[in-house]
Every structure is written in structure tokens, then in C-alpha cells.
Image: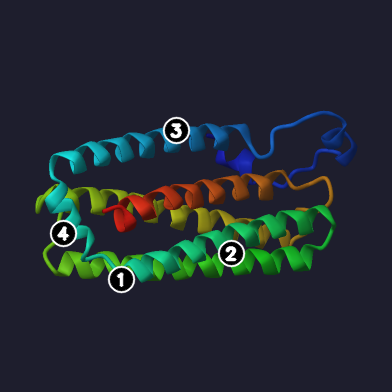
Amino acid sequence: MQLQAVLLPDDRPAAHARSEPRLIGDLAVWLVIAAELLTFGLLFVSYAFARLHEPALFKSLQATLDLERGALNTVLLVSGSAAVAHAVAAFERGRVVAARRWLLAALGCGLGFTLLKSAEIAAKVAAGADLSANTFWMFYLVLSGFHLLHVVAAAVFLAIVWWLAGRGAYGPGRTHVPETAAAFWHMVDLLWIVLFPLLYVMR
């Protein structure tokens, strides 16, 4: 992926952008999203099969996870998605200041999720959970850790968009990069919506 092409301000004329159907966001990032969804999909299926083989182990260790914290993390990511969508809409209307505020709100949600999830993972590791402890902790650490990295990456992407927006990079007809960042954030949100019930709720 040519990251420079993705992050540079979009200077295509607004009339051309609206004259024909177009992909919302950058094609290269959509390919990355497709690859990530496939990877997580394989992990989810593997987790489901492992749980079928060791239901008692998975049920007992799932009960040690904080369901309320998981629900709060869900609220944070969904709220972040809403904020990102508002930011893109604000850019389209030329309300750059409002758009940057929505991006900050999304970044706050991402930071909250990162702090809560990092603390949870650290506590489990301190209590003896590691990749070799048992099948459940292996999947928990791989899925949680891999997803957390994606949240951090999405937050960095939004921070770059926020910074460039302050330099007048985006506005009506110039929302290609914010839309790309939004697509990546929504992917992270979607993955958690599957991951949360899989790890925390399903018994």
C-alpha cells in the first residue's frame, strides 16, 4: 500500500467526484480491510471449533472476564464510529472546525478503549494467562492483542487526518482521506462487535 497516496490531501475537483459513482475511501485500504476481515474470520472460526472441543474450560475462563468492562468498550467503539461519521459529514458541509472536534471525540473513544483493554490484558497476564497456559488464554490474548493493535492504528490514522484538517486539507468534495480513515475505523468497530460476544457473552 502506498501510504503517502492515502494520506495526502485529496485535490480532485468536487464536480468530478460527484459526477459518477465512486468508491468511498481508498481502494488500497479497502484491500487491507478485506485481508484483515479474512484473517479475523479465520481466527473466529478456529476459536469456535476450539470451544466445541473444550466447552467446560472456555465457559469457566470466560466467566472470569469483566462483562461490564467489555460492554463499556463496545459503547466506546460504537460512539467512536458515530463521531467519525459525523466528522466526514461535517467535512462535506465545509464545517472543518466541527469535523476536527468530532475526530477528537473519536480519538477520545479510541484512547479510552486502549486504556481499558490494555489494563485488562495486563491483569490477566499478571494472573498467569499466557499463550501456553491453555487454549482459551491463547485465543484471548491473540484476538484481544491483535484487535487492540488495530484500534491503535485506527487512532493514529484519525490523528493524522485531524492534523492535516487543521491545515485546510479537507472540505466539500475533498473527503477521500477522511472517508478512508472512517472505513478503517468502522472495520475495527465491526470486529469488536463480533469479538465481544464471542469472548465475553457466549456461554
Residue 191 sits above or below residue 33 on the image? below
Question: CB under 8 Å between callouts 2 and 4?
Answer: no
The quadrant in which residue 67 appears is bottom left
The kind of residue tagged 4 is Ser
Which circle, 1 or 4, is nearer the viewer? 4
Give the CA distance from mark 1 to mark 4.
21 Å
Q: Looking at the image, can residue 131 be seen?
A: no
The kind of residue tagged 3 is Ala
Give the CA distance from mark 2 to mark 3.
24 Å
Say which residue label 4 marks. 60
The kind of residue tagged 2 is Ala
Rendering coords of residue 41 (x, y %): 37, 36
Rendering coords of residue 150 (x, y %): 43, 51
Say which residue label 2 marks. 106
Seen at 56% across and 37% down, the residue is 29
Say which residue label 3 marks. 35
Q: Secondary structure at mark 3?
A: helix
Which circle, 4 or 3, is nearer the viewer? 4
Say which residue label 1 marks. 119
Give the CA distance from mark 1 to mark 3.
28 Å
